[in-house]
Image (cartoon, rainbow, N blue to C red):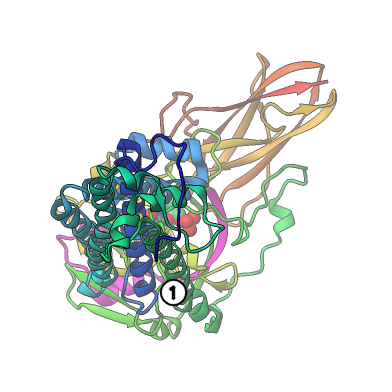
Amino acid sequence: MTITDQQPSDDPTEGATPGRVSHTLTGALVGLATAAAALGGAELVAGAARSFASPITQVGNRVIDAAPPWLKTFAIRNFGTNDKPVLIGSVMVLLLVFAIVLGIISRRHLTIASVGAAGFGLIGAAASIVGVGGAASAVPSVVGGVIAVFAIRWLATKAWDQEHAASTTATVPSSKSTTSSTSSDESPIIHKQSGELDPIVATGGSTPTRRAFLAAGSAAVVIGAGAATTGRWLRGRFDAAVDRAKVVLPKAAKPIPELDVASFSVDVDGATPFITSNREFYRVDTALEVPQVAVDDWKLTIKGLVDNELSFTYDELLDRKLVEADITLTCVSNEVGGRLAGTARWLGVPLTELLEEAGVQSDADQIVGRSVDGYTCGFPVDAVDGKRTALLVVGMNGEPLPVNHGFPARLLVAGLYGYVSATKWLSEIELTRFDEFDQYWVPRGWDAKAPIKTFSRIDTPAALGKIPAGEHPIAGVAWAQTRGIERVEVKVDDGPWTEAELKPVPNNETWCQWVIPFDFTAGSHNITCRATDSTGEVQTEERAAPRPNGASGWHSVVTLVT
Ligand SMILES: Nc1nc2c(c(=O)[nH]1)N[C@H]1C(S)=C(S)[C@@H](COP(=O)(O)O)O[C@H]1N2
Ligand SMILES: [Mo]
């Protein structure tokens, strides 16, 4: 680059030492470009091997684990099923803010900034090892950390050397109006900035120009983004969906009759389907990225307070006598009237058989299900008494367990909330004691033991919906798994409690549909329902929040009749 012309300047700031704003912007670019290069590199490496983990995902997962209960409630309430993208977004924003700070610091304290950059790698590595386990999971984070250190040093040198050059030359009056131009279409900013540097360049110094810095910074951002995209794409080949597609599920040893769904369903617009399709089935878990289990490497271990530790491959499980059962799974996080519930036909191995083979020792009182992602549930040994269905599940509604719902295997115990019983992506069953082990949600303020509370919900008329005056069915679902529903009553405004028609159920481990016609007059009406379980206990009116052991209270909707 050479001086090609000398132009008078009418910009009084031109050639001056870059001010605070300029420092901040330059620092921000140093930081952002460092972050892009490091994260992109880490994601690319994460695509290389199945045992590697993405630092962003792992840090996000640890944030979920550590988040206080009020924050989780807030996130689920305000973002619903978008809570995960929102979390990843927040982690990214936080990370970029820190990166910008490091970039700004790098001007005067490059060593501190370098240590900070390395620190990000360490945080990612720690998050990966805690969450995934194994040193390999930390490899992408370590690579990212190394890239971060090199990138910040390289970019800082480019950024602040040119500034140093500029501040030196700014004291030379003639330099104020010098400029260099290798092409006539340079942007005015670059044109102006490069003017600050030219004397050094002109005198044969090799100090990189601001333009070179901008080019380096932008290249880091672009290459980083490309690397991240490539890494994500590469990781796609480890998707469990590939393994799942190859599974041929055996039939149950003693198949149960196909459900005559119509006989269990109220025939009313707005009613809930009796069987929930796999696609519609609610999903609740702490996993930011659904664990992708490699079936060939997977095995299930039964250990702890047992006489014989057992271990099964996926094929060994499929070779066993499988049973099927229609069971409604419900989440403890349901508010009154909540929809985190679904009914499916599950296929699996009875837990009673597996535990018998393992030989449960008499001091064991808790069965813990541990997931490949570290999640744990725990329920009483007494719950596996042969009276209620308790399965190691491999199939759901005639298909291999969907990846979102725990492929290759999960637990399911009728009558217990999902959080204490239904570990997905199961890797281990451990027999232990309640006084020795707290499952995942217990230290987070939920009860260790949580049988399902009797629940009833109005599905139609819809809350705050409009219906025409005249006869309109009121319908919904009720559940009290393992006890069964005996009665559902409905009340409109201050009218009497009236018994609804209950549809039959295949067993007492599913929900039950109910319906009652009502002649609505114009105006606004308040409809309330309550259920009674087969022990004769009426659902309590007393309102309770989901935490610590499930919400209670009667569901009411207001409907506008026109
Ligand atoms: N590994 C793992 N298993 C898990 C959870 C989880 O967060 N991680 N959540 C539990 C909860 S709270 C519920 S309600 C059920 C939900 O199962 P589903 O997503 O298949 O509906 O899974 C349970 N099993
Ligand atoms: Mo749940």
Q: Judge from the rendering whether residue 73 lies leftward or rightward of residue 116; answer left or right.
A: right
Residue at the (45%, 76%) spot, across then down: 234
Which quadrant of the view contains residue 47? bottom left
Location of residue 152 with respect to 470 vertically, above or below: below
Is 345 one of the magenta-colored residues?
Answer: yes
Q: Residues within 10 Å of mark 1 (few under 14, many from 20)?
A: many
Is 482 one of the magenta-colored residues?
Answer: no
What x and y, as percent, mark residue 236?
48, 74
Q: Judge from the rendering whether residue 330 lies leftward or rightward of residue 365; answer left or right.
A: right
Q: Judge from the rendering whether residue 256 lies leftward or rightward of residue 85; answer left or right.
A: right
User: Does any atom of ligand 1 lie closer than 8 Å to the CB of label 1?
Assistant: no
Magenta residue span? 341-368
> Is the C terminus in the top left, top right, bottom left or bottom right quadrant?
top right
Q: Judge from the rendering whether residue 133 lies leftward or rightward of residue 389; answer left or right.
A: left
What x and y, as percent, mark residue 412?
42, 61
Residue 547 shows in the view: yes
Please, what is the three-letter code of the amino acid marked with disc 1?
A: Arg
Residue 417 shows in the view: no
Q: The residue tagged with tag 1: helix, strand or loop?
A: helix
Per the image, the residue denoted by label 1 is 235
Residue at the (77%, 46%) spot, across then down: 267
Residue at the (41%, 47%) spot, across then down: 87
> Is the N terminus in the top left, top right, bottom left or bottom right quadrant?
bottom left
What x and y, as percent, mark residue 538?
50, 30
Ligand 1 location (quadrant): bottom left
What x and y, as percent, mark residue 432?
19, 60
Given residues 148 and 552, the one toward you in this image is 148
Residue at the (46%, 46%) spot, across then down: 86
